[in-house]
Amino acid sequence: MKSTFESLPKNDSPAMDNVFLNYLRQYCNQHNLTFIEFCKKVGIRRSTMYDLIAVNSNPKIGYFIQLGEAMGVHPLVLLNLKWSMLSFHTKSEQVESFNKQLNDASAFIGETIPDGTIMPAGAKFSKTWTIQNVGKTTWEGRKLVYQNAPMQNQYPNSTLLEEHQLIVVEKSINIVKTLPQQTVTLEAVCIAPKIAGHYIAYWKMVDNHGKLCFPDGVGLSLSIIVRTAQVAY
C-alpha cells in the first residue's frame, strides 16, 4: 500500500492538523501521490516542504508560486490557506515579508547535471540552472557568485590540494539584464576532482554592490559523485 500524507506519523511531521496541509493531503490522495512523489513533482525538498506546512513558519513566496504552477492552482489560494492558520501578529509579519519578496524574487525552473550525477575524475563539464525573475524588480548588474569556503591545505597519503578540489573556472558569473517574468540560464564551467568522493558546491546571486540578493535563500547548487577508474588484475 502506498504511503500518502495520511500515513505520515504525526510526531515526524510538524503541524499535521492544519488547513494548508489538509489541502495538500487531499491533492495527493486525488492524484494517488506519496509524500515523496509529491515533493519530486513540485520540485521542492522534503525538509523545505515540512517547513512550508509548519504553523507560523515564514517560507519564501517563491515556493508558493512553484507549488501553484505544479498543482495548477493560483498561488494566492495557497497563500490564503497558509495565512488562515496564523495569529494576527504573525500574519502581519508574514504579509510584510511577502510584500518585500514580491518586489524581488526568483524561482527555480530547471537544471542540467542533476544531483548525484556520477562524474569521471578530472572531467571538465558545464552545469546550468534556469531561473525566473518572479518579482517586480529588473535584475541588472547582478552576478552569481561561488560560495564555498577555501579548502584546507593538508590531506592524507600526501595527496595534493587540487586533487581533492572541485575547480570552478569562473567564480563569478555575470547575469544578463532580466526583466520581471523573464527567465535566464546561468552556466558554471567546472573540473571534477581527481579523488573519488561526493562533492557539493553552492552559488548565490549578488547585486551590483556585491550584496546578497536573497540572503535567506538556499541559492543554486551542484552535487556530483566522482569515481576513479578501476584497474583490473
Image: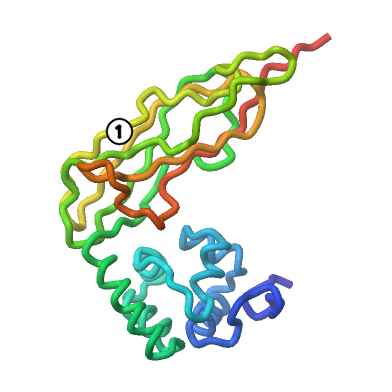
Above or below: residue 4 compared with residue 36: below
Secondary structure of the residue carrying tag 1 is strand
Q: Nearer the viewer, residue 14 or 34?
A: 14
If the image is split into quadrants, where does the C terminus sit? top right
Residue for badge 1: 173
Q: Is residue 12 visible?
A: yes
Above or below: residue 144 compared with residue 107: above
Above or below: residue 233 compared with residue 30: above
Task: Give the quadrant of residue 173.
Answer: top left
Q: Is residue 20 left or right of residue 159?
A: left
Residue at the image position 41 percent from the left and 84 percent from the top? 81
Q: Is residue 218 left or right of residue 3?
A: left
Q: Residues within 10 Å of mark 1 (few under 14, many from 20)?
A: some
Q: Which of 118 and 18 is in front in this view?
A: 18
Q: Which of 230 and 60 is in front in this view?
A: 60
Residue at the image position 52 percent from the left and 69 percent from the top? 51
Q: Where is residue 217 in the image (x, y as percent from the top left)?
A: 41, 55
Type of amino acid under label 1? Ile
Residue at the image position 68 percent from the left and 17 percent from the top? 229
Q: Where is residue 47 in the image (x, y as percent from the top left)?
A: 57, 62
If the image is split into quadrants, where does the N terminus sit? bottom right
Residue located farthest toward the right when viewing the structure as drawn: 233
Q: Position of residue 90 (x, y in %)?
A: 40, 83
Q: Where is residue 38 in the image (x, y as percent from the top left)?
A: 54, 66
Q: How is the image coloured?
A: rainbow
Label count reads 1
